[in-house]
Image: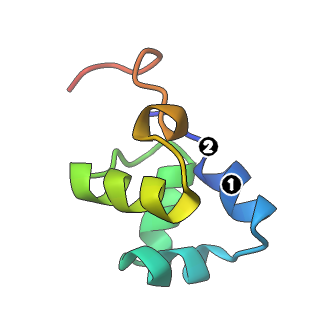
Amino acid sequence: MKNKVRELREKMGLTQGELGQSVHVSRQAIIALEQGKYDPSVWLAYDLSVFFGTEITELFDFEGSERK
């Protein structure tokens, strides 16, 4: 699923590890998420949207993604 996680993380000057710690997932999970290889759980999507101060639908591109 396409998302703006990398863009927003870089704007905040955070490493993947720092973002992972902030939302309680591994650096590897953030890497996979940014590369579109991992679709987050609803709770992770929520935590990321709260962390970045944005709506889930602004952070993730549901329309451009295959429904699983």
Q: Element under label 1?
A: helix
Tell me if label 1 and label 2 are in contact, CB under 8 Å. Answer: yes
* Mark-to-mark CA distance, 1 and 2: 6 Å
Q: Quadrant of the C terminus?
A: top left
Q: Element under label 2?
A: loop
Choose between 39 and 23: the one closer to the eye: 23
Choose between 10 and 47: the one closer to the eye: 47
Here the colouring is rainbow
Which residue position holds label 2?
A: 4
Where 2 falls versus 36 (above or below)?
above
Report the amino acid beneath label 1: Leu
Where 63 falls versus 37 (above or below)?
above
Q: Residue at x 38, y 49 (%)?
A: 38
Which residue position holds label 1?
A: 8
Q: Quadrant of residue 11?
A: bottom right
Q: Quadrant of the N terminus?
A: top left
User: Badge 2: few (under 14), some or many (20 or more) residues near its Cα, within 10 Å?
Assistant: few
Residue lying furthest top: 63
Residue 20: x and y in percent read 48, 76
Q: Residue at x 61, y 43 (%)?
A: 4
Where 40 falls versus 66 (above or below)?
below
